Image (tube, grey):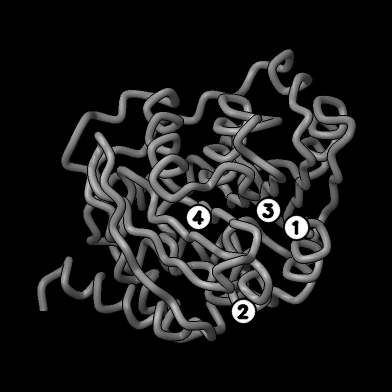
C-alpha cells in the first residue's frame, strides 16, 4: 500500500467512527478544492470547525456527536495542509490568502452568521478570519490557540523540529508522547497519526501574531480554552494576555489537557464548555 494510500485509508477509518451521518463534499476555490464534512440538522446554526495543523477534519471524532446534535457542522480540511483538500490553484503566500480562501467557502456554502471553532493552527486561522470579517461570524471558540495572544515555546519548537524536517511514524509518536504524556486511547486515531508522517502537504502558512490594537477591536463573543498541560506555550501567560486583549471573552483552562490531546482525549469537559457557549 502506498504512503498516500495508507494515509487516506487511515483518514477514512477515523471518519467512519463519527457517530453521526456525514456528507463529504469538495468546494472549489481559486486555491483548489476544499474537503468539507457536513453533518447535523439542516436548519441548525452553522458551525465551522478548523482543525489543528496535521490533524484534518476527521480529528473532531470525539466532539462531533454533541456539536452536531443541534448545529449544522462544516468541518474543513485546511487548504495547504494534509487531508483531502487539494491545493492546486493560487499559491498560499500568507494570512491574506487564507482569509480569501475562507471568504470563498463562506460565499459558496452560505455561511454568514456561522459560529467558528478552531484548534491550534486552526484557532489562529479562525481568529485571523474573525479580525478580517467580523460581520460574517456569530461566535468564536479558540482551543489552545497558538501564536494568537503569546508566542510558541522555543522548547516545543525544538522538540518538533526532527519530526518536521524528516517525519517518520516513530518521530510523530515520540513527539506526541512527550507533549501529551500518553498514547491515544482510540486505536484508529493512533494509526491515523502514524500515517501523517508520509502524507503530502503543500503550504502551511506561517502564523503572524495579531496586533494588540486589532485584537482589542474584536467584539465577536469569544471563548478561549487553554490546555493546562500544554507544552506549546505557557497556558497561564496566554490566559493573562487573552484576558487583557479580549476583556469581554470567556477564558478558561481545561485541567489535565495537553495541546495535542485537547480535542480527542477525555473530551467531556471540552464538549460541555463548547455546547454551553455555542448556543
- Residue 65 numbered tag: 2
Label 4: which residue? 51
- Identify the image quadrant of the C terminus: bottom right
Q: Position of residue 154 (x, y in %)?
A: 57, 35
Precedes in sequence: disc 3 or disc 4: 4
Label 3 vs label 4, nearer the camera: 4
- Residue 204 numbered tag: none
User: Is residue 144 or residue 74 the one in the foreground?
Assistant: 74
Residue at x 49% of width, y 30% of height:
207
Q: Position of residue 63 (x, y in %)?
A: 62, 72
- Identify the image quadrant of the N terminus: bottom left
| Mark 2: secondary structure | helix
Label 4 vs label 1, nearer the camera: 1
Q: CA distance from mark 2 to mark 1?
A: 14 Å
Precedes in sequence: disc 3 or disc 1: 3
Q: CA distance from mark 3 to mark 1?
A: 24 Å
Label 3: which residue? 230
Q: Position of residue 142 (x, y in %)?
A: 68, 47
Label 3 vs label 2, nearer the camera: 2
Precedes in sequence: disc 4 or disc 1: 4
User: Image height check: is 50 above or below 149?
Assistant: below
Residue furthest left as drawn:
2
| Mark 1: secondary structure | loop
Q: Position of residue 254 (x, y in %)?
A: 80, 60
The answer to whether residue 48 of the structure is visible from this angle is yes
- Residue 278 numbered tag: 1
Precedes in sequence: disc 2 or disc 1: 2
The answer to whether residue 152 of the structure is visible from this angle is no
Amino acid at each position: 500500500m502506498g504512503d498516500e494510500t495508507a494515509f487516506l485509508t487511515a483518514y477514512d477509518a477515523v471518519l467512519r467512527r463519527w457517530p453521526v451521518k456525514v456528507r463529504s463534499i469538495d468546494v472549489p476555490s481559486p486555491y483548489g478544492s476544499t474537503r468539507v464534512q457536513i453533518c447535523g440538522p439542516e436548519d441548525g446554526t452553522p458551525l465551522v470547525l478548523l482543525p489543528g495543523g496535521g490533524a484534518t477534519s476527521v480529528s473532531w471524532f470525539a466532539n462531533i456527536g454533541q456539536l452536531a446534535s443541534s448545529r449544522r457542522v462544516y468541518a474543513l480540511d485546511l487548504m495547504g495542509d494534509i487531508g483531502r483538500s487539494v491545493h492546486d490553484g493560487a499559491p498560499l503566500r500568507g494570512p491574506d490568502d487564507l482569509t480569501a480562501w475562507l471568504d470563498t467557502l463562506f460565499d459558496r456554502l452560505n455561511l454568514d452568521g456561522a459560529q467558528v471553532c478552531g484548534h491550534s493552527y486552526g484557532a489562529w486561522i479562525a481568529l485571523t478570519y474573525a479580525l478580517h470579517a467580523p460581520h460574517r461570524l456569530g461566535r468564536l471558540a479558540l482551543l489552545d490557540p497558538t501564536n494568537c495572544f503569546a508566542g510558541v515555546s522555543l522548547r516545543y519548537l525544538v522538540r518538533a523540529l526532527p519530526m518536521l524536517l524528516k517525519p517518520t511514524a516513530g518521530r510523530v509518536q515520540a513527539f506526541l508522547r512527550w507533549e501529551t504524556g500518553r498514547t491515544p486511547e482510540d486505536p484508529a486515531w493512533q494509526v491515523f497519526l502514524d500515517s501523517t508522517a508520509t502524507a503530502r502537504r503543500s503550504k502551511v502558512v506561517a502564523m503572524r501574531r495579531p496586533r494588540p490594537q486589532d485584537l482589542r477591536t474584536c467584539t465577536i463573543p469569544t471563548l478561549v480554552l487553554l490546555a493546562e498541560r500544554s507544552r506549546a506555550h505557557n497556558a497561564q501567560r496566554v490566559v493573562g494576555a487573552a484576558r487583557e486583549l479580549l476583556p469581554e471573552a470567556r477564558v478558561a483552562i481545561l485541567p489535565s489537557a495537553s495541546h495535542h490531546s485537547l480535542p480527542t482525549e477525555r473530551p467531556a469537559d471540552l464538549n460541555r464548555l463548547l455546547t454551553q457557549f455555542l448556543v
